[in-house]
Amino acid sequence: MSYVRAMLGSYPGDFKLDVDAGVLAGVIKAAVDCAQACGTDTDADLSEPHLAEMVACIRLCLDCADICTATAAVLGRPVSWDNRVVRPLVEACAAICRSCGDECERHAPRHAHCRVCAESCRRCEQACGELLTIMR
Amino acid sequence: MSYVRAMLGSYPGDFKLDVDAGVLAGVIKAAVDCAQACGTDTDADLSEPHLAEMVACIRLCLDCADICTATAAVLGRPVSWDNRVVRPLVEACAAICRSCGDECERHAPRHAHCRVCAESCRRCEQACGELLTIMR
Amino acid sequence: MSYVRAMLGSYPGDFKLDVDAGVLAGVIKAAVDCAQACGTDTDADLSEPHLAEMVACIRLCLDCADICTATAAVLGRPVSWDNRVVRPLVEACAAICRSCGDECERHAPRHAHCRVCAESCRRCEQACGELLTIMR
Amino acid sequence: MSYVRAMLGSYPGDFKLDVDAGVLAGVIKAAVDCAQACGTDTDADLSEPHLAEMVACIRLCLDCADICTATAAVLGRPVSWDNRVVRPLVEACAAICRSCGDECERHAPRHAHCRVCAESCRRCEQACGELLTIMR
């Protein structure tokens, strides 16, 4: 799983995560991958001949990429963990992944790039949901 | 106010914002400025001789910069506005601006860079609060 | 000029910038503003009825926003200044601002959002050029 | 390799990359992973008792994360490929990965997080070098 687990497991001394390391690493990894997939999906969408049908997908992918990037960055520095910040941020991430995944899925039968992107959104939405559950 | 208002006011045809343009522009501008101030404050904090006292401030500034950047980006593309995404995102932004502003304020008497950064956090927190109020 | 100048002017003790503070602040401010304008221009472009004509503009705006954001962030932490990194980064920023400005200018007569965005690209390109000149 | 290869391989119709897809995917993946590792290394560095020794590492990791993120985003939308933009951007990425990798390596014997981060920087520097070679 990239370097995420290795990095989270190599903090000095007595540091203890507020949440399960595997779940946290799963969200970080899923968010980083989803941000990348959504960025490339934007580019592929813009290459489609029926552009007007892709506009909603492009917009959602742009939002999804930005929110996933910020979520991965904040969760990737877990020492300053604050539920008042993390919870709404992960909720926003789950919400945009759901919307973006839904829209990508609509295009999945015709556009392979949307099928792959939908998969990345679903995985990230699920990982965010798992984290929100154990945070309570 | 930079180009924010001019950009929001130049959408084609019949586009109508979900919220007041002035309030929206205020949040975008405040978030962009706060992200920049927090980024530079990190660098200035790392230049202080009593580093151990600055660690919490550095961590909060890093989170604040990332969340403000994402918030400004998403709000800056308002056509795809979705309260289920925008509300938690702006809540996360307000929460980190409050925490980061509180911590910067503690250092403000000794460090001018923290005083300026605290001001940028306060303005962004307030702008986010205003937006959340009119969204309901 | 936002908080940029105040932040750069409030570093502790004996810190001395590698370049003129006014020029540096000018690039940071221009890059932050250009990133914001390009982000919103993407959204406005996607709202135009003749979408196929806007595709190149959207793509350049996306690249311009990402490169401007990174450039502003790196220049905004000037203590670790390294010409081997800063020079190509600012060159990339100047190059994308030129391309994006050229494309936006083509649409400026019909689309006000592209006119404003072109202006932000030109200002950032010019600020980058000024910085590259004094960096020798 | 995450979704990078699948996304690059699913563009519509007649799209042909300017460079080898495997090399391009390798840089994107390495840059995304390096940005994540550097972000977490910042947090781990800030947890070390001998903070003054970690300051250079923190600063380089911050720059490395920002430049890697922008590089991955721009390369991840390859249709608008422009050597005048891509080359200096990838050069900047290679340069910061080298500096950050060097600094992390100095700390690697004592700090496992710096050892992992150095590895991610080395891989990204190498991938960038490979891309620059085939671009000429």
Image: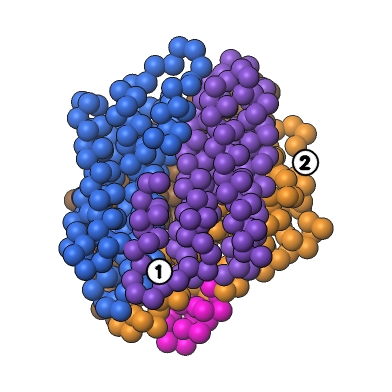
Chain colours: A brown, B blue, C purple, D orange
Residue that carries the numbered disc 1 in the rendered image:
D42
Q: Residue at x 29, y 29 (%)?
A: B23
Dot 1 crowding, Cα within 10 Å, few <14, some 14–19, many 20+: many
Q: Earlier in the sequence, mark 1 or mark 2?
A: 2
| Residue numbers of the magenta segment | D100-116
In the rendered structure, does residue D98 fall within the stretch colored magenta?
no
**Dot 2, crowdedness within 10 Å: few (<14), some or many (≥20)?**
some
Q: Amino acid at mark 1?
A: Thr
Q: Secondary structure at mark 1?
A: helix
A88 sits left or right of C73 in the view: left
Q: Quadrant of residue D122?
A: bottom right
Image point (54%, 22%), residue name: C112
Could you say which disc has been placed on residue C66 in the image?
none
Magenta region includes residue D102: yes
What residue is at 19 percent from the left and 59 percent from the top?
B105
Q: Position of residue D51 (x, y in %)?
A: 34, 80
Element on which disc 2 rests: loop
State how far apart marks 1 and 2 are (Cα): 38 Å
Report x, y in % for residue B120.
Answer: 29, 49
Residue at the disc numbered 2: D16
